[in-house]
Amino acid sequence: MAVTKKWASTISVVASSVFAFIIVFQIPLFRVGCRNKTCESPLEVISSQLIGSELVPSSLIKTLLYPGAIAKSLLRRSPPPSYHNLFHFYHFHHLNRASSSSSLSTDDIRHLEVFAGCCLCLLGALLSIFKPRRLTFIGTLLIYWGLLRDILLFNSSSVRLYPTLFLASISAFLSIRSDVRKIIHCCCCCTSKPLSKSL
């Protein structure tokens, strides 16, 4: 029993760390239209909505985006963007009050599940510092639902799912310690029964 708890705790910590890394450093998980650009990570989707609505100070949004901007610049082998020009780096500088005060576009309404899932993923990734939550897994399921519905019902060619989204889903599921403990316990029981019969 103690070994099961130890393995479950280790797997949960590693999985939640992987998920937080994917979200914070904005590993591309999908491709979907958001406002006037294409977003490839939950933070980009959330930022595009928050910048347009001006409900959150831009300094907070830049703080969330900056680790991913550094990672992107390292992959491109280019100098990291300055903190003040971060919105230009992400092509968010066209989002202004005029565009946000208007009613939601068709794409925004169609992708409400994706936006909700991205919010849950970000919240779960931040809370996983203290304790992993089910929010992360629910968030990835919502993103799956929104994107697959868009592809199947609306035949949208601009929507893409990347294999990294599956990795994020697995990491989110394995970060739930209680579920991992049940899986390990079931595996141990299944392997012990054939051994006991053979003996």
Image (tube, rainbow, N blue to C red):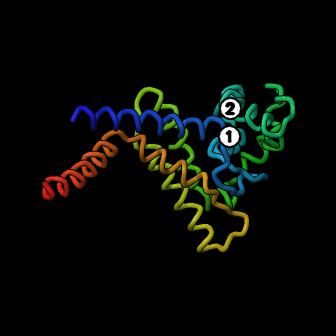
Answer few, some or many: residues within 10 Å of disc 1's Cα (few below 14, many 20 plus, some between 14 and 19).
many
Q: Closest to the observer: 20 or 15?
A: 15
Q: CA distance from mark 1 to mark 2?
A: 6 Å
Classify the position of the N terminus by image quarter.
top left
| Residue that badge 1 annotates | 47
- Among all residues in the image, which is located at the extreme right? 78
Q: Amino acid at mark 2?
A: Ile
**Label drawn at residue 31:** none
In front of the other: 32 or 128: 128
For label 2, the SS is helix
Single out the residue that lies furthest toward the front: 199
What crowding class fits label 2: few (fewer than 14 Cα within 10 Å), some (14-19), or many (20 or more)? some
Residue at 75% across / 34% down in the picture?
Answer: 69
Give the mark nearest the N terminus, 1 or 2: 1
Q: Position of residue 11 (x, y in %)?
A: 41, 38
Measuring from the top left, give residue 61's x and y in whole percent. Answer: 68, 32
Amino acid type at image mark 1: Ser
Above or below for 19 versus 193: above
In front of the other: 196 or 143: 196
Q: Which residue is mark 2?
A: 61
